[in-house]
Image (spheres, grey):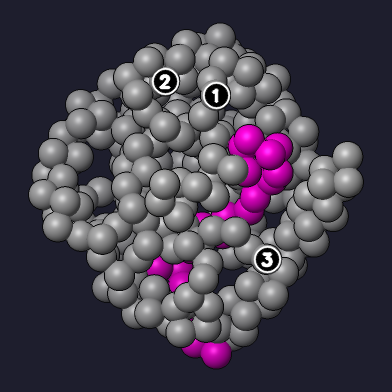
């Protein structure tokens, strides 16, 4: 079993919780402050770094990946691509996202065909992921760029049916996302119902601006939470979440 796959599936099986920091290269500068932040979250046991964004206008991704690896080469660096141009074989893995909540064929399979030959030649660990976009109370970049309608956040049954379909198609991971800058996080009921319907690791992101919302996501069944926009505005949110998860996982071990 590959390293990232093993870690994700072990977390789900052991009921341990994990945190991913989503870094947008368009909004990040690999300066001394950023490197100090990497050192701090590494010390606190950050589980994953996702790297990507909806637009990715800059050419800084390679530089940022290299800078992170020079500080800590052990944190898995996973591409979270918005399109096929967001590719780097210097990362450790890639969320091979199929936007199963939408009906845009390009994001269901089209771009996957384009990048597949590159992935076959790379050493990236490919993580087949069902990406499910949920209404976070505000139109986000993901909505606009993907040209898809998010699932209403008061319709957990649609999210469950979508996750089940992805599971039957053989997808191995699921990502419920309200989108970067979402006004509200995904409701606990929806997370809980999706988690009960699948046996795969569940990633949850979007709208997690407070520790309380992260706690709620974990309680509902999320295996991994993704902190992105919230950490951009306030890195202490990420450090507080990591400190909480360390205590939570310790209590799970004791029990």
What percent of the width, then of the height, locates residue 1?
Answer: 42, 47
Secondary structure state at the residue bearing disc 2: helix
The answer to whether the residue labelled 2 contacts the one labelled 1, judged by CB atoms less than 8 Å apart, is yes
- Residue 203 painted magenta: no
Question: Label 1 belongs to which residue?
Answer: 199
> Position of 74 compared to 249: left or right?
left
Relative to 84, say whether 231 is above or below: below
Q: Which residues are magenta?
A: 11-32
Q: Against 34, is 48 above or below?
A: above
CA separation, marks 1 and 3? 25 Å
Q: Earlier in the sequence, mark 2 or mark 1?
A: 2
Task: Name the spot of residue 171 as percent of width and height, x first.
Answer: 37, 28
In this rendering, does residue 247 appear at all?
A: yes
Q: Are marks 3 and 2 in contact (CB under 8 Å)?
A: no
> 115 or 32: nearer the eye?
115
Dot 3 or dot 2: first in sequence order is 3
* Magenta-colored stretch includes residue 29: yes
Residue at 37% over, 62% down: 92
The disc placed on residue 45 is 3
As measured in the structure, the alpha-carbon distance from the residue carrying label 2 to the one carrying label 1 is 9 Å
Q: Residue at x 57, y 55 (%)?
A: 20
Residue 42: x and y in percent read 63, 73
Residue at point 62%, 43% (across, down): 11
Q: CA distance from mark 3 to mark 2?
A: 30 Å
Name the residue located 51 percent from the left edge and 71 percent from the top edge: 74
Is residue 131 shown above or below 120? above
């Amino acid at each position: 079993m590959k390293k990232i796959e093993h870690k994700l599936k072990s977390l789900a099986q052991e009921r341990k919780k994990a945190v991913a920091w989503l870094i947008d290269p368009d909004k990040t500068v690999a300066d001394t402050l950023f490197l100090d932040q990497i050192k701090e979250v590494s010390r606190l046991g950050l589980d994953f770094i996702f790297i990507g964004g909806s637009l990715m206008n800059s050419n800084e991704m390679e530089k940022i990946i290299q800078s992170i690896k020079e500080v800590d080469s052990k944190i898995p660096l996973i591409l979270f691509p918005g399109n096929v141009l967001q590719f780097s074989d210097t990362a450790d893995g890639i969320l091979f996202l199929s936007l199963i909540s939408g009906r845009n064929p390009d994001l269901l399979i089209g771009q996957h065909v384009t990048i597949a030959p590159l992935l076959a030649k790379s050493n990236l660990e490919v993580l087949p992921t069902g990406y499910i976009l949920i209404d976070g109370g505000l139109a986000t970049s993901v909505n606009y760029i993907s040209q898809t309608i998010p699932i209403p956040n008061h319709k957990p049954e649609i999210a469950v049916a979508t996750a089940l379909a992805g599971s039957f198609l053989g997808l191995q991971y699921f990502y419920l996302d309200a989108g970067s800058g979402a006004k509200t996080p995904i409701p606990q009921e929806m997370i809980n119902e999706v988690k009960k319907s699948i046996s795969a690791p569940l990633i949850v992101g979007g709208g997690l601006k407070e520790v309380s919302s992260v706690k709620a996501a974990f309680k509902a069944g999320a295996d991994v939470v993704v902190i992105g926009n919230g950490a951009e505005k306030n890195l202490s949110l990420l450090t507080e979440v990591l400190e909480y998860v360390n205590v939570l996982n310790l209590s799970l071990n004791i029990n």
